[in-house]
Amino acid sequence: MKTAVPYCLCWLPLLLLLLLLLLPASVVAQAYSNKTLGSSLTAGDNESWASESGEFAFGFQEIGTGGYLLAVWFNKISEKTVVWSANGGNLAKKGSKVQLTSDGNFVLNDQEGEKIWPVDSTITGVAYAAMLDSGNFVLARQDSINLWESFDNPTDTILPTQALNQGSKLLARLSETNYSSGRFMFILESTGNLAMYTTNFPQDSENYAYWSSKTTGSGFQVIFNQSGSIYLMASNGSKLMDVLTNEASTEDYYQRAILEYDGVFRQYVYPKSSGSSAGRPMAWSSLTSFVPDNICTSIRAETGSGACGFNSYCTMGNDDRPYCQCPPGYTFLDPQDDMNGCKQDFVPESCSEESQEKGLFGFEEMTDVDWPLSDYGHFTEVTEDWCRQACLDDCFCDVAIFGDGGDCWKKRTPLSNGRTESNNGRRILIKVRKDNSTSEPRNEGKKDQSTLIITESVLLGGSVFLNCLLLLAAFIKRKSKTLQPHQAMMGANLQNFSYKALEVATNGFKDELGRGAFATVYKGALPHDDGINLIAVKKLERIEKEGDKEFGAEVKAIGRTNHKNLVQLLGYCNEGQHRLLVYEFMSNGSLATFLFGTSRPDWCKRTQIILGTARGLLYLHEECSTQIIHCDIKPQNILLDDFLTARISDFGLAKLLKTDQTRTMTGIRGTKGYVAPEWFKTVPVTAKVDVYSFGIVLLEIIFCRKNFEPDVRDESQMILADWVQDCYKEKRLDLLVGNDEEAFGDMEKLERFVMIAIWCTQEDPSRRPTMKKVVQMLEGAAEVSIPPDSSFSSASSSIQF
């Protein structure tokens, strides 16, 4: 007789099976893995979002006492090693917050709500964020499609299962504790070649390839597989070459590969448990394979400092790491960063006719060292004594090198590409002061200080200016105060100058550098510990006089900006009716002077200025803490520094002007020929007005002529933008190039730049690209589609950026 089974027990196995089937789905949806809209983290709260296994975490890490880094790190080891970061060049302060907002944006704001770092602003529809067990931090849609992921936007590190596609790159950090962009790059170029470059520091562009896979035309992806091998793969899936290999299992070891701040690409492993492998310590261990083998001798660039900073030399240690050292008579510029270069520890020799310094210099000798690319003189079949005397008699000579074959090289600072070279048969003669090679000449303190001030003042102006500086220096010394008597503005490294101090510094506002509709700029000088710093003081005249608080808030927003392609704001004056801004002085003037002078500038330099201007605008529009629309981009507002780097000026001044002035062409904001069409309509302007102006400036730089030239013979050539449209349509851009042989030899790039300019100057703002898209197209990272023309069928008119 069968025993009756209770009804509820009959269903128990089915219920258990159903629960088992549903379990994985419920686990995925747990709060610890997916962060929904409204989730946030605050710097200083010691909270983070961990992956499901807990091996990785996303959140804030405090970097020394400098601020907080938004990062992803290994979470189960004591070092909490960072593998990705968002704001290395702009650390957040305590109280800053990263948030997945209710409308699907993911932003990092400071404690006052100002944006520090945004994810790509074109991303929409984010439903949740997740820290994955692979170390990949993702933003995803409701259907789990990733819209953004850290694996696609690496900093200096890659992890197992991560791949680098063509155009992807790693940028080394500046130092071990400084996460801003450094001096080296690892990139899979769009050509398929895998290479390591020095950068045009402080720019992120490539300078010199010191290692290459030589796989142009075949390289497709760099793969870091789960077996721990890093290799270059072809488009058909075959392996082209091993980059780094190891025998450590990813099951037993955490692994990472990093382009370190010294320029070497290394692979590291860390045991997941103490018993994982006998003999290996519980710490990151560098594997024996790395590239390049010897970075000290790998870099031999015509520009840049080499593996170490200027005036230093590189030596490979027994641990296969490069170390930077200073020659005799030199010390590190920054004792905390030995890759930053060295400076002379003595007053250099004077070349003035009145100099009485003959006989005050001698040599410190070295061997097995060389600076191979700093020569300005080379002599053959001479003796060492002749070489020594030739350098002593030459006030420009800082180093003489004598070779066994009777060669003599004269070098001047800064020395570059320094490295040790064993048994190279050369004697290095470092010129130093004989009385005291590590200090200034022994003179009476007052006399020396006065002489220094007098010498520098004479170089800057006449006797009145000199007297002003002397009186100012004496006042500073007596009162033990600096020229900035007021406190620095909170949240920005700006100085609050008094009007009187700036009046003295500019010699009564006499040396005028330029004048506009709302301001006049004067040249000035400020005493400094190392001499005198030149400044540019902008005296604003037509701004709202709304008091200290409003003006200070706007200046604070401008002062937070920090980019290599912007002119740096140093301070301000907000005293009574006076409103002044103090900027760093740009020695090479404006792009207008550079571009429209008597001789045509170098094509390569012009392309660098184009890229620099575009990157500066991208920063203002999308990457700085508060979006800034410039509203007046033109060659006169693009300045050039000592190295002819493009630096945008006058950005943010629209915030300081009256509302009605920002909406007219004839008022303050905008210059005829550069003004976007929407300025004439009763609609709010957007960042696309800057894109339009950039398009006009882009054409001016390409063809070295102003947009409006009324004196041309052919009226069809009067307006450059219209003439370019006609020539592009007729495929006759050569008519515009003229006798510019350099540009003519680079017609492919020139045509691409022209197409970008046409897109930028579209009448409809929605059809213009964003500056991010512009930069990508200029760099060749994004394809440039054929621009529309009113006479063409507008098949492409639906394209919106």
Image (tube, rainbow, N blue to C red):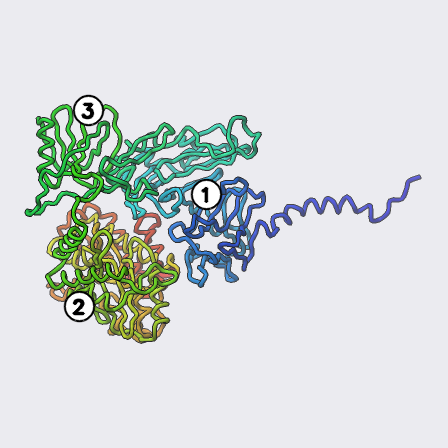
First in sequence: mark 3 or mark 1?
A: 1
Q: Quadrant of the N terminus?
A: top right
Left or right: 170 with respect to 255? left
- The amino acid type found where label 3 is placed reads Gly
Residues packed near mark 2 inside 10 Å, few (<14), some (14 to 19) or many (20 plus): some
Label of residue 83 in the image: 1
Determine crowd level at label 1: few under 14, some 14-19, many 20+ residues with C-alpha closer than 10 A. many
Label at residue 273: none
Image height check: is 563 above or below 158?
Answer: below
Q: Are marks 3 and 1 in contact (CB under 8 Å)?
A: no
Query: In this figure, which residue is indicated by the disc labeled 3?
Result: 425
Q: Is 497 located above or below residue 166 in the figure?
A: below
Q: Mark 2: which amino acid?
A: Gly
**Quarter holding residue 615:** bottom left
Residue pictured at 32% horizontal, 54% vertical = 563
Q: Which mark is residue 508?
A: 2
Q: Position of residue 720 (x, y in %)?
A: 20, 61
Mark-to-mark CA distance, 2 and 3: 59 Å
